[in-house]
Amino acid sequence: MNRREAIERVALLMGGAVIGSEFFLSGCKPAETQVKDLFDAEHVAYMNEVADTILPDTKTPGAKAANVGQFMAVMVRDCYTPEDQKVFVKGLSKLDDACDKKFGKKFMACDAKQRTALLVQLDNEQKEYNKVKKPDEPNHYFRMMKELTLLGYFTSEVGCTKAMRYVPIPGKYVGEIPYKKGDRAWALV
C-alpha cells in the first residue's frame, strides 16, 4: 500500500471502530489504575520501526518522524483494557517470531523489503482472523498496531501539516478553499 492509498483509507478507519474506543467515550483511566512500565525505550524504538514500515518516508515524513511508537505506548498503557494490553504486548513477540520463522532473523535485523513482506503477510492474517472472529475473542495484535499507527500519525503535527493540507486556526475564515484532483486531504485539527 502506498501513502496515497493509506490516506484514502484513513477516513474509513477514523469513521470505523478503533480498538480502544472506550478512550474516546470515557477518557483515559485514572492514574492509580494505569499499568506502569509496560514499555521501555527499546519497545518504543521497535514500535517506531513497525510503524515506519506501515507508513514510510515518501515525499512526506513517515511514522517514525511523528514518533508513533511513543504514541502507541501511551495509548496501550493508558487506554486499552488489560486484555488488549496483553494481546498487544504478546503481539510484539509474535511479530518477531513470525519474522524469525520467515527470514531467520528478528524484525529489527531485516531490510525494508523483508519488513514490508512480513507486515503484508500479517495484515492478510489479521483480515482473515477478523472475518471469523467472534465478539468475545481477543483482537488481533497486528490490527491494533496498524490502527494505532494510522491514528498516531494522522493526528500528529507531522501527519497533519506534512502529509495533509493544513490551514492553521485561528485565522480568518475562508469558507471555500479550492481543491484540485490529487491534492492532499485536509487535516481537521
Image (spheres, rainbow, N blue to C red):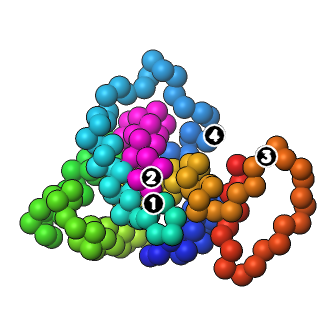
Q: Is the magenta stretch mostly helix, strand or loop?
A: helix
Q: Distance between the residues labelled 3 and 4?
A: 26 Å
The residue pinned by badge 2 equals 65
Identify residue type, mark 2. Answer: Ala
- Residue contact between numbered discs 2 and 3, judged by CB atoms under 8 Å: no
Nearer to me, 122 or 42: 42
- Specify few, some or many for label 2: CA neighbours under 10 Å numbering under 14, 14-19, or 20 or more: some
Identify residue type, mark 3. Answer: Ile
- Residue contact between numbered discs 2 and 1, judged by CB atoms under 8 Å: yes
Residue 82 position by quadrant: top left
The residue pinned by badge 4 equals 25
Magenta residue check for 165 = no
Tally of numbered discs: 4
Residue displayed at 62% across by 34% down: 26
- Specify few, some or many for label 4: CA neighbours under 10 Å numbering under 14, 14-19, or 20 or more: few
- Residue contact between numbered discs 4 and 2, judged by CB atoms under 8 Å: no
- Specify few, some or many for label 1: CA neighbours under 10 Å numbering under 14, 14-19, or 20 or more: many
Q: How far apart are marks 2 and 3 (CA)?
A: 23 Å
The residue pinned by badge 1 equals 62
Residue 33 position by quadrant: top left
- Residue contact between numbered discs 1 and 3, judged by CB atoms under 8 Å: no
Regarding mark 4 in the picture, which secondary structure is present there? helix
Regarding mark 2 in the picture, which secondary structure is present there? helix
Report the disc number at residue 169: 3
Asked if residue 129 lies left or right of residue 107, the reply is right
Asked if residue 178 lies left or right of residue 35, the reply is right
Q: Distance between the residues labelled 4 and 1?
A: 29 Å
The residues colored magenta run 62-85
Give residue 52's position: percent from left, percent from top.
Answer: 38, 59
Viewer-nearest of discs 4 and 1: 1
